[in-house]
Amino acid sequence: MGAGFDLHFASRRTVISQRQLDILAYLSGFARDLEDSWDVPRGLSLVGLAEHLGVVRSALNVPLKSLQDEGLVSSRTAHVIGASRRRKVFHVTQKGREASESEGVRPQRGRSVGPIPDPMSIQGRDGIVERVSAGLSDGTNLLLEGLPGIGKTSVACAVSHSMLKGGWQVRWATCNTDSDASAVAGMWIGDRAPASSEAIAAKVDSKRTLLVLDEAQQVSSRHVAAIQRLIEDCSETSASVLAVTRAPNPFSGLSGFDSVRLEGLEPSLARGLLPAEMDEEEAMDVCRAMDGHPLGIKLWSPEDDLPGAGAVQEYVESTVIRRLSEDGTSSLDELSISPLALRIEEILDPSGVEELDDSAILRWSGLEVEPHHLVRNVRRASIPDERASELHSKMVEAWSSREGTRARRMEAHHRLESGTEDSGWLTEYVPEIASEDTSAAAVVLEQAISMMPEEALVEMAADIALERGEAEIASSHIESLSEGPSRDLRSARLARVKGDWKLAEALESSAVSDLEPGQRARAQISSLVRRYDDRLPGNISEKLAEELMAGTDSVDLSQLEADDRALGSLALDLLRHSLALELGDLEAASRTRASLEDRMGPDDPRLYSLDLRARLSAGSEGDAFLEALESARSHIDSSDDPMDALRTIHLSLESCTEPPDWLIERHSSFDPGSLRDDLASHRRAASHWWYWRGVLERDDRLSSWKEAIQRLRTAECTQASKELIGKLSKEL
């Protein structure tokens, strides 16, 4: 319904403009209880309203005042979430809600997944929104490109909400510098999303589904190739893909996509961004001077001199940034040099944040904030190198005093950018980052190696690439290592990731023989455990079990330090106990169990797990088995260790001919993301979770088993991955 729509109220007729209707419709989307709430969303403030409606804030002053005069909108001061002080906020009245409802807004029929922005009004983009929507509806995959601040995200958001109204499902992902394929999948799919591009593509393969990848240019060069492979794989499915990126396009030779370039608005269309009551000639001058650049127009202030045509970036530097106070500039500098968006409480100097927000410089995502990329890029480029180093050093000091993996990731970035080449710090703390986020750790290491290509850092980078199953990246790092057993062992791991187990065995055998005694023993134990795990659930072959049992006796621990010798002996006995149970040698299992109790103590919780495994292995029926299964259930529910709980779930599934409902539910609700990607045992356990998901959830078998195959390769379980490929081929 457009301008001039008549609404009848008690004593007179009021004409409501389109902008006023847009305000009423937006405010009506907020719950009534917020009218008395102490904390309210930012969207109820003037800056939030302006962002939603896609106009400068001053364009709302007159329509808001008119709405208040008519009793359709009320205002008050309240604490805005994310702001440091109380602000004026607006609420729609009951009379206003009735006016909004009469507009007849078409309800959303589709479903969205991921951090899709709220619906917003955009000026002058109806044609491009319709064209992009039509192309995607027809099955064309599109790459939406344009300058920073030109409105790419706004257009993608408008397209998405238009398609939601048409009954489509929209899966939205917004990238940052640490985003990899797994992070994108987590946003597109949610909990327990697969990580391999093939499995993700299989999971999202559905008609009337739109996949949106926003801010693709933010992705680190470390992960761009994997992201490109993901969207290309998805482009071959029944879903439609919309990738949004700042020009120039970060993808190389992207196939399966048509490109759409977003340009500035024509002055007549850009005019709608400015107040309706503004002098027409002046308004058109502003629009022409800014080349129809939406963000440039929103940053403009009536006190500013107009830039020359095509000089938006110069205007940002010479006018927008220079008019900031010292506090505003300080906060902008901190936000501009940060690798990631920040929460207000994380900002060392937040005193200028409100000024930045009032100046339309900030963009918000939930509670995290960063400068609009146009402003950020201009500011980064204008900071002298010496000043930048000082700022980064200041941030090093700030983040070093904070706890947690995120703090270490931020500290690593600022250390590197400050010019402090400290490979020792990286060697110590990158593993901590990797324990929770191998994607971020990989980005940090790539940045570090570009500055100081030291052997220890390259080894870490190779190891992380191997853990992530990134064969090409791992190979490039391994090739730059010095010749020797360390390089050969990594080459063996690479061969296993590629599926060449014969080459892997030859390389490993040669490397192990050249290692120092302690290193040799550790490598042998790791190899034995990996070979034991390199199979799908089920009974181990007698031949392999006997080979592994003989292998445990051939490991020489005599030259290890006392503590290492004890750990090695414990690992070997745990393997012997498992093998004895697999072979049905209860006598050998009992002897090994007694030896373990002597060293671990009778109260060690690991003994309970061993005993439970023995009970479950005894049979799949009878009262004793049912009691064992109930004990397993209790153990799963009480365990604080995700790995221990998952092992018990898998043992229980293996022992059951028909798994009970409670066991299927425990498996389904387990989050494999709680396991560590940097530990081989955890990676192998996660791969088995995906295998069992494919067994228990037949409708999801294709995606689950594709993910399991990739994870088995990553975990260097070559034989198991080949076996599962065979099982999957029979299903297709």
Image (cartoon, helix red, strand yellow):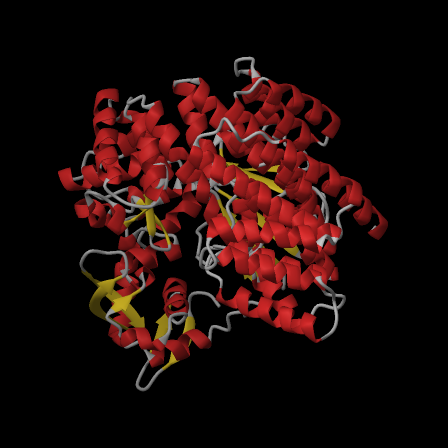
- How far across and down, in percent of the image, does residue 134 sit? 64, 51
Which residue does the image show at 45% across and 55% down from the upper left? 117
Instruction: Give the number of marks.
Output: 0
Left or right of residue 325, residue 401 in this image: right
- How far across and down, in percent of the image, does residue 408 sit? 34, 39
- How far across and down, in percent of the image, does residue 13 sit? 35, 79
685 in relation to 549, above or below: below
- For this orientation, the residue located farthest to the top is 483
- For this orientation, the residue located farthest to the left is 326
Q: Is residue 386 visible?
A: yes
Which residue does the image show at 59% across and 35% down from the upper left? 525
147 in relation to 214, above or below: above
Q: Is residue 160 visible?
A: no
Which image quarter: residue 322? Answer: top left
- How far across and down, in percent of the image, does residue 681 sit? 57, 44
Nearest the eye: 547 or 192: 547
Which residue does the image show at 44% across and 47% down from the upper left? 269
Left or right of residue 549, residue 631 in this image: left
Nearest the eye: 402 or 593: 593
- For this orientation, the residue located farthest to the bottom is 10
Which residue does the image show at 42% across and 65% down from the upper left? 3
Left or right of residue 256, residue 46 in this image: left
293 in relation to 453, above or below: below
Nearest the eye: 501 or 514: 514
74 in relation to 52, above or below: below
